[in-house]
Amino acid sequence: MSTLTMSSIAQLAHVERSTVSVWRSRFGADSATPFPAPVPGTENRFATDEVVRWLVDTKHGNNREVEFDAPLYDSNLQDLLSPAHRERVISLLAQARDHSCLPSELEESDMAQQLDKLCDATYSAQSALQTLAKHVALTEEGVREESLTTKGINLVMAVLDALAEDGQRLLTAWSLGAAALLARNTSAAAELHEDLADANATAQLFGQCFTPPAGPAGSKLHVYMAFHDVDDTLFSGIEQMVLELGPWDAAVIIAPTSLLVDNLVDLPEAAAARTHLLAPPRAATITPLRYVAALPQGLTRNRGRMALGMWVLAHTEDEFTACASLRLQKLSVAAVEAIAGDALAAAAGGQTARERGFLSTVRVSTSWLAKQPHLHVARRQSLPLDPGSTLAQAWTLRDEVTEALDHLVIEPSNDGSDATIPHLTWRAATRARRALFKDMPGAKFSGTLTPLRNRQQPGATECWEREQLINPTVPLRLFDRFELELNTANAPLTQPGDVVYLPGNEPAALVDGVGGRFVRAPVRIARPIPARLLHDDLEVGTVASVLAEDIRAGAAAAPDEPRIRAVARERLEDLAEVARDLEARREAHRAEIVALTRLESHLLSGVSGGALTVSSLSDRKDR
């Protein structure tokens, strides 16, 4: 006899569990429509047929398809997935999927009736397989150990979707946890790795759930999940994946941070295995590790305090690894999208990675990182820079500029040795006598002040506000300076070269090249101290463009994180002059873009009105 529990009745009727308890107490034996009594010998199990009949007759619940959906929730589902029947059930449903019907020898059997009901309830044998896989993912201990919370699923699937769409890669699961994740959450083509497919009936179930790839398989996105925090066999599994990693493939590994990121001082065997994996002693190339992230806690369903890490492997034209510290990151929708974009940019490498504004991330040489005892690179570390590759990259970027900067002289350091990037904490960089810049608050003035419309009006003063930093295309508003000074106390005006920035969760910063503007809180001012005014003991300083870039990277939002880059004192004036030159070129391009937009608008109006005709010079040459 098939039965339902209180919870499965609630799921079938699309109501809360407490609602079923109310039905039992309100519709007792003396009611005109009594709720079905439990099956004899049980306390909370009810005959499926009786429950379905009661829901249909009384029209309770929110599901009008209870007769068809009942097989998705009753005890027959557990019977079909019992160890004695699972392998046979998977085989039969796979045949039904391929041939559109169950084998004829099952026509009169109880299993055939159960499978027929399940296929009818889910509309197809393929859907029935997916229903069984979902049930296994929620109930079987071996799979539940590698299951993610909703927040974890959203993050991992965002990364997989970004990487899969980038190269039209075929998703390939290398572990039961990865297979369960893909079978339940992806609509893209996927497959099970052949080594896992032969493991057991559970793996075969997930393999049958994947949509068969259309046509020959091209590049692949390998997915591996393992949540055992003291299991050094993880690296042997990843090593096999690396051996199969094609030139256009990518791989995503989700495992405990303790293995993927942290220092393995207490696990010498795992430490040796990880180092051997990332930097094989006699191999010509190192493992193409492109992205390492320490993820927040709370992403695992059954081990809530376990912190997970993520690796992304891919072959690129350069050998850099992006190391992200996301332990304290709140996984908002925007943050998840940013992390997925970071993983994609790191896997792409080249110009894509160079132009990416990574979230809480440092890019370092992969060959250097592979030999480190831990893979968490904080900004406080002095990271090595190879002078040759740094110079070559600078020349390449200069040549990509539309107008070649012939006058911009770029040379390596005098000694030719490896250089470092010194970083200071926000607190250290603003410390009184040894400060690199001054940090000043904006003004708080009444929101009832009316902006001016006429820029030529005497006393009109521009004002930096939050909206102009978030979207620099929004023009600065004008206010009467006399009114502003009446509503504020000791509000400093900006000076040319000041950095106006917005602290908090959405850091933004721009260099004010004009000066003489008011700054409205919560916007603040960061004013670099000129080299001649720095403390005599200081050998470093900063310039506006460097400071603004560091703030945009989140320095002001997390003042305890050392993200302020210092510049050698003797290079401050040269770098400031170059920054002013580049900003002038950017401003000229912005003016040209505005002029092009106005020209286009005028041409559209003239042509649509019949006053003008236009054609391109290339068209005339073709004629």
Image: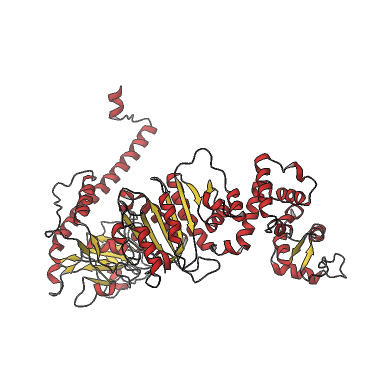
How far across and how far down the image is residue 9, in percent?
73, 63
The answer to whether residue 115 of the structure is visible from this angle is yes
Front position in the image: 350 or 332: 350
How far across and how far down the image is residue 19, in percent?
72, 68
Residue 8, quarter of picture: bottom right
Q: Is residue 450 left or right of residue 401?
A: right
Quarter of the image for the C terminus: give it: top left
Q: In this view, does 416 lie above or below 95?
A: below
Residue sitting at 57 percent across and 48 percent down? Answer: 210
The answer to whether residue 478 of the structure is visible from this angle is no
How far across and how far down the image is residue 616, in percent?
30, 30
Front position in the image: 216 or 48: 216
Residue 411, quarter of picture: bottom left
Front position in the image: 3 or 520: 3
Colouring mode (rainbow / by chain / secondary structure / one colour): secondary structure
Question: How many numbered dots are placed on residues in this image?
Answer: 0
